[in-house]
Every structure is written in structure tokens, then in C-alpha cells.
Image (cartoon, grey):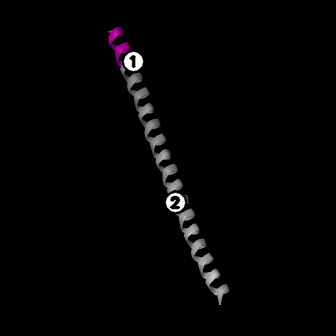
Amino acid sequence: MKNKKLVTLVVIALVAVLLIALIYRIVAGLLGLMNTAVNAVIGLIVIVALVALVIWMFAYAKSRRK
């Protein structure tokens, strides 16, 4: 009878540890995904800013030529 309670306790502890590990991996994955999304948004902002700068440079050069 004691042995059965010990096995049940060990199985419950193992399931708890595995559940905590699973939750940790899910949270870590979500944080990595959020980091990637933030980097993508920053990259798009930089590209748009560079395109705007080039357009402004050509417009400025065209207005100075006249």
C-alpha cells in the first residue's frame, strides 16, 4: 500500500515538472515570436524612412536645379 502511494506521488511530481517545462517553453516561444515581430516592424520603419529620404533628396535636387 505504501509503495502505491509513493508511485502515485512520483507520477504526480513528474507530471507537474513536465507541465512547468511545457509552460516555460510556450512562454519562451511567445517571447521569441514577439521579439521577431518587433524587429520586423522596426525594419519596415527603417526601410520606409530610407525611401522617404531618397525621395526627398531627389525632390530637393530637382527644386535646386531650376
Query: Which residue carries the number 2 mark?
Result: 41
Residue positioned 39% across, 18% down in the render: 10
Does residue 42 appear to the left or right of 16 in the view shown? Answer: right
Residue 38 vertical position relative to residue 23 in the rendered view, above or below:
below
Q: Quadrant of the C terminus?
A: bottom right
In front of the other: 37 or 9: 37
In front of the other: 33 or 55: 55
Does residue 16 appear to the left or right of 66 in the view shown? Answer: left
Residue 35 location (% of width, % of height): 52, 49
Q: Secondary structure at mark 2?
A: helix
Labels 1, 2: front one: 2
Residue positioned 47% across, 36% down in the render: 24
Residue 45 location (% of width, % of height): 55, 64
Query: Which residue carries the number 1 mark?
Result: 10
Residue 2 counted in the magenta span: yes
Residue projecting furthest to the right? 64
Q: Quadrant of the N terminus?
A: top left
In front of the other: 45 or 6: 45
Residue 15 location (% of width, % of height): 38, 26
> In 3D space, how far apart are the residues under numbered discs 1 and 2 (Cα atoms)?
47 Å
Residue projecting furthest to the front? 65
